[in-house]
Amino acid sequence: MKEERPTLRPNGRLNQSTEATLSVLVDQINKLVQNDVLNSRCAAKLIKRLRNEADVIRDNGNSTKSGRSELNKSFEAAEETLREHDAGLLVAANAALRVQDAI
């Protein structure tokens, strides 16, 4: 049987991320993909999970206009990097197929 995670920290505060924390995480994921340290599939899954966490923050009323704006910029930059990275992979795969066809 799976054990439920507690919703409160020992000091009684909610265990919840902030928009600023999520923004930093998204920016770090973006840099890892740009530096070819993290593959785009893994990064996309992490970004999706962080978007869900951002929704929780917004739904709990712990969101600010400036925080949402900064977080949205981070998400947009990461998604652009993912699109560029995936496009590069597609070009490389097509080139490899052409080389195989030429042999």
Image: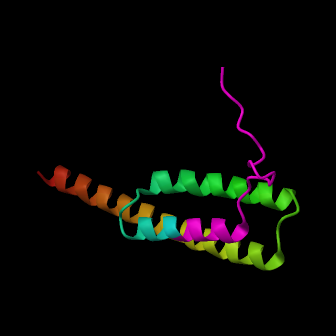
Q: Does the magenta stretch include residue 28?
A: no
Q: State the extent of the magenta-drawn residues as a range.
A: 1-27
Identified at 41% across, 56% down, the residue is 39
From the viewer's perspective, is 32 left or right of 12? Answer: left
Identified at 71% across, 55% down, the residue is 53
Identified at 23% across, 55% down, the residue is 96
Q: Position of residue 37 (x, y in %)?
A: 36, 62
Residue sitting nearer the eye, 77 or 87: 77
Color theme of the render: rainbow
**Number of marks present in the image shown:** 0
From the viewer's perspective, is 53 left or right of 60? Answer: left
Residue sitting nearer the eye, 63 or 79: 63
101 in relation to 77, above or below: above
102 in relation to 71, above or below: above
Residue sitting nearer the eye, 20 or 96: 20
- The dominant secondary structure in magenta is loop
Identified at 88% across, 62% down, the residue is 61
From the viewer's perspective, is 8 left or right of 99? Answer: right
9 in relation to 91, above or below: above
Question: From this viewpoint, which residue is outermost toward the front?
Answer: 11
Q: Does the magenta stretch include residue 18?
A: yes
Q: Position of residue 84 (x, y in %)?
A: 46, 69
Q: Position of residue 78 (x, y in %)?
A: 55, 68
Q: In which quarter of the image is residue 91?
A: bottom left
Q: In which quarter of the image is residue 90?
A: bottom left
Question: From this viewpoint, which residue is outermost toward the bottom?
Answer: 66
